[in-house]
Image: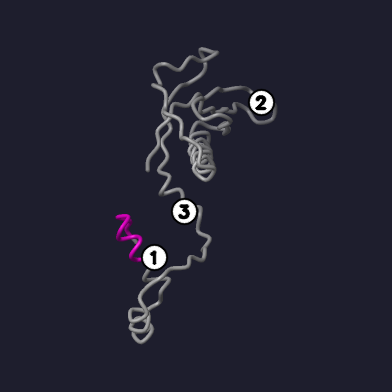
């Protein structure tokens, strides 16, 4: 699922680092990051937003509805308001690569046939889930 939220980029001069952009996603409490360029800050904001949404999902919390970016009020004329998008499914595929064990039930005759054919349950289940979810590769 793709999530799109407004973000506030606040530039500030930091000794020894030059201009640093702090990024806040106002609709997602505590979702704040930074970068030493707009590009780095944008990347960090996507990473932070994905992490915050994933944490809310795991805690079974409601995901906040994004505000209209035109309604965002900033504290400085130097602030930049833009939209940040994150594909949570893509994020999970790239970041959450740890395997987990799931117990499944299937008819005994099917298990015997699969074993006789040398089919890997793990690979077959992964392929079936990807097919059901419309995920390539």
Q: Which residues are magenta?
A: 126-136
Location of mark 1 (residue): 126
Question: Is residue 47 in the magenta section?
Answer: no
In terms of secondary structure, where does tag 2 sit?
A: strand
Tell me where residue 116 appears, x and y as whole percent: 36, 87
The reply to whether callout 2 and callout 1 are in contact (CB within 8 Å) is no
Q: Label 3: how many residues lie within 10 Å, few (<14), some (14-19) or many (20+)?
A: few
Q: Is residue 27 above or below residue 123?
A: above
Tell me where residue 23 appears, x and y as whole percent: 54, 28
In terms of secondary structure, where does tag 1 sit?
A: helix
* Mark 2 or mark 1: whose residue is earlier in sequence: 2
Q: Label 1: how many residues lie within 10 Å, few (<14), some (14-19) or many (20+)?
A: few
* Mark 1 or mark 3: whose residue is earlier in sequence: 3
In the displayed orientation, state which residue is furthest to the right. Answer: 15
Is 112 in front, or is 73?
A: 112
Tell me the mark number nearer the camera, choosing from 1 and 3.
Answer: 1
The residue that appears at 54% across and 27% down in the rendered structure is 24
**Disc 2/disc 1 C-alpha distance (Å):** 48 Å
Location of mark 2 (residue): 14
The residue that appears at 34% across and 60% down in the rendered structure is 130
Q: Is residue 99 left or right of residue 20?
A: left
Location of mark 3 (residue): 94
Looking at the rendered image, the quarter that the N terminus falls into is: top left
Q: Is residue 1 left or right of residue 9?
A: left
Q: Main secondary structure of the magenta part?
A: helix
Q: Quadrant of residue 83?
A: top left
Q: Label 2: how many residues lie within 10 Å, few (<14), some (14-19) or many (20+)?
A: few
Tell me where residue 21 appears, x and y as whole percent: 56, 27
Q: Is residue 8 left or right of residue 121?
A: right
**Disc 1/disc 3 C-alpha distance (Å):** 16 Å
């Amino acid at each position: 699922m793709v999530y799109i939220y407004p973000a506030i980029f606040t530039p500030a001069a930091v000794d020894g680092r030059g201009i640093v952009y702090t990024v806040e996603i106002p609709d997602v409490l505590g979702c704040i990051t930074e970068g030493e360029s707009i590009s780095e800050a944008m990347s960090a904001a996507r990473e932070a937003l994905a992490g915050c949404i994933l944490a809310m999902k795991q805690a079974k919390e409601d995901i906040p509805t994004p505000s209209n970016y035109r309604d965002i009020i900033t504290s400085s004329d130097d602030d930049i308001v833009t939209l940040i998008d994150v594909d949570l499914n893509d994020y999970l595929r790239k970041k959450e690569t740890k395997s987990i064990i799931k117990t499944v039930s299937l008819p005994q005759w099917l298990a015997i046939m699969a074993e006789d054919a040398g089919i890997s349950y793990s690979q077959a289940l992964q392929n079936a889930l990807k097919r059901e979810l419309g995920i390539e590769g």
